[in-house]
Amino acid sequence: MKIDLGPVTRLEGHLNVKTTISDNVVEDAQCVGEMFRGFEVILRGRDPLDAQQVTQRICGVCPYAHAIASSYAQEKAYNLAVPANGRILHNLIQGANHLYDYLLHFYQLSALDFVDVTAVLQYKGADHDLVKVREWVKAELASGKTYPAAPFLPRLSGKYVDDAEVNIGALKHYLEAMELQKKANRASAVFGGKFPHATAIFPGGCSQTPELDLIVTYQALIEEVRDFIHQKYIPDLVTVAKVFPEYWHIGQSKGGFMSFGLLPLGPQPDSKQLFAPGILSGANVSPVDFGAITEDVKYARYSSPTGLTVRAGELVPDPNKAAAYSWVKAPRYNGQMVEVGAAARVLVDYHQGNNPQVKKLVDHFATLAGITPDKLNSVLGRHLSRAICAAVIADFVLEECERIEPGKPAGAEIRIPATGEGYGATEASRGALLHYIRLQDHKVEKYECVVPTTWNCSPRDDKGNPGALESALIGTRVENPDEQIESVRIVHSFDPCLACAVH
Ligand code: NFE
């Protein structure tokens, strides 16, 4: 039986997932990116300093990651020395964006896969007093009524949290989380100029000088976000994990993991990072080699050659290409599929013992849940990994504030050479992000982006091997093949952004 899950909602962009079900098991899955964009074409021939502005428009969720990756690539191409303040402001802007993104993903995009809001939504009291809401909901639930309410309904059938107090609490946090997202975005804008698309991010730093009042404003906003992470986000996630422990064992991807490393601890290009880069295969971590990345297009709607390296990348759209089923290319590392994202970021760091706080949190939550760290490769594992990243990043950006030299410039003097090239790699919230720039006559000759959701939502590669999300879906047992809440929970755990994936 063939069932399309698309358009899958509560994710960014246009994703269809085509499933083939046999005996209530997902026998096959195809991720279909349903849109073409072509930012790399737009950039050809432009002033290179347009790149960190133009590539931010790839996405309204993770724009700063694109600005930062572009800035890193240009820093290499220009051989630019970055002032300490410059790197710190890059980190502060990008770090705050991660915090916003994790809250958005857990509450707005995922929580309603688990939390039951049907009764809460019907509450008509004007006071929103928690005690009254709770009593009302208990009475409503006891009456056995059913509800047709929008906008959260209809929804997929399946098991949801059945404790009314937990459901009410989670919905309150759903609303509260939006206020905290606003604060995280304001924090980014303190130095970036605005949200979503920062005007102040440049190669070498930031055009905004970090005066003391700005630093204090940033700190105050992030302290509130950090409190919410510890007091609400993490406890809510632990509650969901207790009700749905089976999701530590559902949704495993079947390849390795890749992280490009996140938040450099100094201005030098080879600085250690808060989250270490690496390729994880089994328990072995090896260094990342950008030359080992290629993009297959046998099943993607492009007639440009397949298997090209990033440096040689081409983009010739071919909407009617036979056998192709997606606008997303299939990036591979040494020909192998890898998962990217928060779980990859945490596991790659954990296995290198890079960040003691990451190790402590992974071990703590693994013990609490009775799992081994490899179970981060699961639906709940991806959610937990985001929460761990949130806790670690919130502490780090506050520490970074103490290292700023107030009033000293945060920008470098930029001279664009006639020729040059550079890779810029970072971790967007959804995973490993790579930009590549090559200059000719002071202009962009070639620009390439290899983006997190391109990895995770890739179609089959030339050898016919599935992408990370496809592989995580295949083999999943589903209670109701027509609806497949299990499959949708797996899709959401990857937090796909199709606008980014097709860029
Ligand atoms: Ni459009 Fe993005 C992130 C990037 S995902 S959200 O995070 O880069 O492919």
Image (cartoon, rainbow, N blue to C red):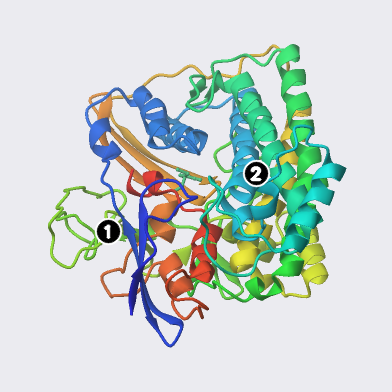
How many numbered marks appear? 2
Whether residue 108 is situated above or below residue 376 in the rendered picture: above
Name the residue that disc number 2 marks.
103
Residue at left offset 74%, top offset 75%: 371
Kindly identify the amino acid type of the residue bearing the numbered disc 2.
Answer: Leu
Kindly identify the amino acid type of the residue bearing the numbered disc 1.
Answer: Ser
Considering depth in this image, is 22 or 208 the residue closer to the camera?
Answer: 22
Q: Position of residue 352 (x, y in %)?
A: 67, 63
Name the residue that disc number 1 marks.
326
Quadrant where the C terminus lies? Answer: top left
Q: Position of residue 236 (x, y in %)?
A: 76, 54
Residue at left offset 71%, top offset 35%: 397
Mark closer to the chain start, 1 or 2: 2
Give the SS element for disc 1. Answer: loop
Check disc 2: other Cα within 10 Å, few if <14, some if 14-19, many if 20+: many
Considering depth in this image, is 492 or 211 the residue closer to the camera?
Answer: 492
Considering depth in this image, is 160 or 94 the residue closer to the camera?
Answer: 160
Q: Position of residue 216 (x, y in %)?
A: 77, 19
Residue at left offset 73%, top offset 40%: 394
Most extreme residue toward the right is 131
Residue at left offset 45%, top offset 83%: 25
